[in-house]
Amino acid sequence: MAHPTVSRRDFLKVSSTAGAGLMIGVFLPAKKRLVEAGLVSGQPFEPNAFLAINPDNTVTVTVMKSEMGQQVRTSLPMIIADELDADWSQVKIAQADAHPDKYGSQGTGGSGSIRRSFQKLRKAGAAAREMLIEAGANEWNVDKSDCTVSNGKVVHSSTGRQFTFGELTKKAANLPVPEDPPLKNPKDFKFIGKSMPGLDTPSRVDGSAQFGMDVQLPDMLYATVIRCPTFGGRVKSFDAHEAKKINDVTDIFAIEGGIAVVGTNTWAVVKGQRTADIKWDHGKFAKWDSSRIRNMMQKKGLGNAVVAREEGNVAKAQKDADNVLEAVYEVPFTSHATMEPMNCVAHVNNGKCEIWVPTQAPQRVQTTAAEALGIPEEKVTVHVTMLGGGFGRRLFADYVIDAVEISKKTGKPVLMLWTREEDMAHDFYRPTSIHKLSSAMTKKNRATSWSHRIIAPSISAQRSPETFSKGELDRSAVNGASNVPYEIPNIHVDYVMTNTQVPVGWWRSVYNSQNAFANEGFIDEMAHAAGTDPYKFRLKLLKNSPRYLGVLKLAAEKAGWGKKLEKGRGRGIAVHKAFGSWAAQVAEVTVNRDGNFSVDRIVSAIDCGLAVHPDGVRMQMESAIVFGLTSTLKGEITIKDGAVVQSNFHEFELLRIDEMPKVETYIVESNEAPGGAGEPGVPPVAPAMTNAIFDATGIRIRKLPIRPEDLRV
């Protein structure tokens, strides 16, 4: 850049640190501009967070990821604090506002918060540590190698003299940032690998933790939105007369997404929504329902497909086989059903916009709001609140557009809240899918081929249709299928795209959830056809995959695999790799003759590499099992007249506390690089369950959700 530009905000964040303490800043492209402007050191240092050490010896870590129950406000600071050797009792957290490039990606998804930040955050802590040691050595006029750090202090080894970090901040702030600071030997970790007290636990307990719906601003209005129930539909006309009769409803008007009802409290706008008289143009999709969608998918599934994996010759293997096993598995659309419905607080004023929002993608919110308002991104400030559930739903910013549009129209700050019914009707649903599988088997119980056709809508193609205009493969749609781990000589995996106007989106573990259901159900069918124990059948086909074997053996051992169960009880197993981690589960069920059943126990094993925060990993596995069981037993979104049938939790039920099985989680000890923890626990749930049901009843479940009528014997 010939003339580097630096925002006032960036300038203040750097120039103010010399007097206040030591701040290790994170500037990716933004750092380059500051370097060229002569405002920061030119040494390359690119972690994805801020680390501020204050004169009072407190250490503030700015967390650039969104907290929705996965403990990032504890686990990410643990990484920096460990390399820094900070006093944990003096570590504080701050939530990063959105910035186009300062933090790198602020998106929270794909179980990537730790695995994509681990080394960078270690370097952030290590760089600060080295600068503090150098500052202390300079003060004592001793060699740097004679100094160490311990519990928030720099110590001169020979004399025992000490400085707190806070006492050295001004001196350290003037030193160059180390280009490649030495990292700790993992054996010296103090926090990493241990379960530390949650830094934000007190705020969760005392109620001060702020979720999107908690935001209160002076002179704030409240709003909700009514959208056309039919996908692709639009407003034809509306009569606001009756809605405006509701006390505290101040206005009702059209916006891009539908009709906005505005008032001075939430209950007023909800009542106004219920009385609004709206005429809809339902569009062409009103002729569609779940049956028609399924028929379309089945028909397309008979045609051409895009190959995702091809090894050997499946056709020849099947021709030469003694037996060809075939099966079809199906899963429905399903909803995220976050406890906190979509909401956003926006204040558009004087060409600027300030937003408070529970989001997994603050930078997308910033860009979306700027585009909707026609203003530069730097005029949009995005504050990230706590999330009352995300699961991928809050990677989208559709609800943010509603809020900024209403605020612009009213000229006041607005808390825009969707009702549960709107939230259910206008989700980005996990795609429905059909899976056609076949395998060639020999008389010696050997599998010689594996074929898997995935027929499903494409999330990527729906968002970026131009990228897939020539029938390109959507790699994400075959995640967990194209990388099936079993050692079978002939493998063919392909994909058929079947998009409709039903919006689809990322859902906890995304396509891995349905592909694993098909894979692990069918491998059990192959084991049964071969007359072999399904656990031992897997072991043989995974003999060269040590991390698969590790979790499989651990789960089986802890579950007591092979021990006889009472009549009507069954045990099933499943294993899957996703998001850099390996997970296996054993489910135990009891099935009655009338088809009613209970899930009694799930034993879960995970190899997520180095488990930075083990309690956080266990919580995520338990959460994944609740989430996975809900979709396995209850979660189904159906379409009628082009719209979602389910409106609230009486029709889209969630797992209840009395239905929750006993869960045991075991973590494989490992020094491998950290993998994900939030999503890997979901894919094995459904197949472990259905395999257990087969073990108990001899009935094979190939379609979700499981219904009692499917199990009557």
Image (cartoon, grey):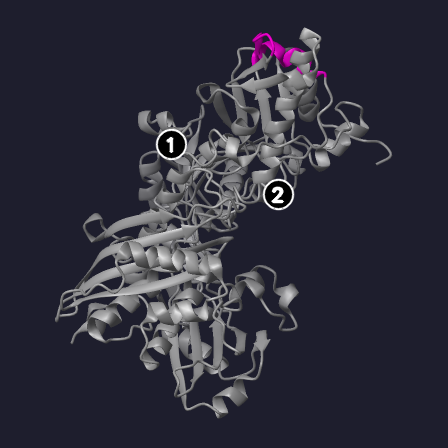
The furthest residue to the front = 158
**Nearer the observer, 604 or 243:** 604
The label shown at residue 464 is none
Where's residue 184, x and y in %? 58, 31
Q: Is residue 258 visible?
A: yes
Mark 1 against mark 2, which lies toward the viewer? Answer: 2
Image quadrant holding the C terminus, namely: bottom left
Measured in 3D between alpha carbons, the distance from the residue under mark 1 to the one under mark 2, in whole angstroms, is 29 Å
**Nearer the observer, 295 or 669:** 669
Q: Is 13 above or below relative to 364?
A: above
What residue is pinned by disc 2? Answer: 367
Q: How many marks?
A: 2
Q: Which residues are magenta?
A: 158-174
Q: Is 213 above or below relative to 609?
A: above
Residue ID at (33%, 73%): 702
> In screen coordinates, is 52 left or right of 402?
right
Callout 1: SS? loop
What residue is pinned by disc 1? Answer: 264
